[in-house]
Amino acid sequence: MMGFFETAFGPAELEILEAALAQWCRERLVDRLSPEAAIAAEVFINLFREGNRTSSELQEAAGHHKWLMEWPSASQGTHPTEAKESTLPTSQCA
């Protein structure tokens, strides 16, 4: 578990994360400065820390992540602002 928290993010790693997030936002018509994009960025960082270190690995892992998958894509014909508010994860921190 220590490796999870000790993950270093250099320029190459940030570029991979940026590309994955950009693709996710583009596919779902999500504004990059929106709260949903911020949540997605946190998820992608965690997926990266879990060992998904390439673009293809991140996309594969994102395809299995419940929240990222449930957010409607543009190809589904549903605009992201029409998604249910209840799809946002809630914090378990007190």
Image (spheres, grey):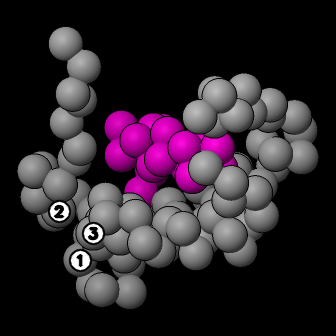
* Residue 56 rendering spot, x and y as whole percentages: 71, 74
* Label 3 sits on residue: 70
* Residue 57 rendering spot, x and y as whole percentages: 68, 70
Label 2, label 1: how far apart the Cα atoms are: 8 Å
Against 6, residue 73 (above or below) is below
Callout 2: SS: loop
Residue in the image at 81% along x and 45% along y: 13
Q: Amino acid at mark 3?
A: Glu
Picture quarter containing residue 92? Answer: top left
Callout 1: SS: loop
Answer left or right for 90 relative to 51. left
The span picked out in magenta is: 30-49
Label 2, label 3: how far apart the Cα atoms are: 9 Å
* Residue 54 rendering spot, x and y as whole percentages: 77, 64
Residue in the image at 23% along x and 44% along y: 89
Q: Are marks 2 and 3 in contact (CB under 8 Å)?
A: no
Earlier in the chain: of badge 2 and badge 1, it is 1
Q: Quadrant of the N terminus?
A: top right
Q: Amino acid at mark 2?
A: Ala
Callout 3: SS: helix
* Label 1 sits on residue: 78
* Label 2 sits on residue: 83
Q: Is residue 7 visible?
A: yes
Give the main secondary structure of the magenta stretch: helix
Q: Amino acid at mark 1?
A: Thr
Q: Quadrant of the C terminus?
A: top left
